[in-house]
Every structure is written in C-alpha cells, then in structure tokens.
Image (cartoon, grey):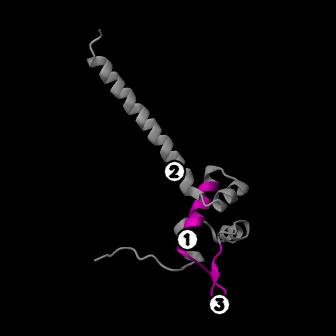
Amino acid sequence: MIGPKIRRLYYSAKEVTDETGVSAQTLKTWEIKYPMVKPIRHRSGRRLYRPEDLDRIRQIKSLEATGYDEARILSLMHKGQGFTALTAGKEFKLLLVEIESELTEIRQMLTQYVIPF
C-alpha cells in the first residue's frame, strides 16, 4: 500500500535539481542573485534546501520562463507577491471572460423569449 507523499524538512541540491529541473549551477547563481533563496549549510558543507526554498525556486523559474527580468522578479518576491499574485491576476481575467460569456448567453436567451411591446 502506497501512502501519501511525506513532505521533507530538507532537500539536497541534487533532489532540488531533479524536482525543479533547475541545474545545480543555476541554483548557485540564483543564491547570489536572489537573496530569498538561501539554503542552509550542513556541517559537511552540503547545501540543504527547505520546502519554502523549493517553492521560491519554482516561482523564480516560472517567472523567468514568462519573460520577467531579474529586477522585476526581485521586486515581486520582495513584495511577497511572487507567482501567486501573477496566477491570481490571470485567474481573475479568466473569470471575467467566463462571466462575460455567460452574460452574453443570458442576453441572447432573453431576447429570444421576451415579447416586444
């Protein structure tokens, strides 16, 4: 029987690269560019990432893939917005388009069944 996936406290750099698709060299670069990605160091010197670091790395990767530059990513991440604000904005736009579509349908139905005076 396979149980739920256990959320770990720390991930090695290899596990982070496997899970996010970001290379080890890019991770090292992002540690310098983005102060919010700050792994802890084990006594042996290995970098260990927390689940929050993994989330931030995914956000940065997504923002870079979308075309955001380093300065814009830093400003979004420092404001605490990150990826969630961007997806919320996109979801809001999709919701508005859906509402507009439904209102158009209702309008068409009303014009079909309303008897002109």
Q: Is residue 45 above or below residue 95?
A: below
Task: Identify the residue shown where x is 69% and y is 67%.
Answer: 30
Task: Identify the residue shown where x is 71% and y is 68%.
Answer: 29
- Three-letter amino acid code at disc 2? Ala
Q: What is the quadrant of residue 75 in the picture?
A: bottom right
Foreground: disc 2 or disc 1? 2
- Three-letter amino acid code at disc 3? Ser
Q: Which residue is mark 2?
A: 88
Question: Which residue of the protein is positioned furthest toward the front in this rendering?
Answer: 117
Q: Which residue is mark 3?
A: 44
Foreground: disc 3 or disc 1? 1
Element carrying mark 3: loop
* Neighbourhood count class around disc 1 (C-alpha, 10 Å): few under 14, some 14–19, many 20 upward: some
Earlier in the chain: of badge 3 and badge 1, it is: 3
* Neighbourhood count class around disc 2 (C-alpha, 10 Å): few under 14, some 14–19, many 20 upward: few
Number of disc labels: 3
Q: Which residues are magenta?
A: 38-64
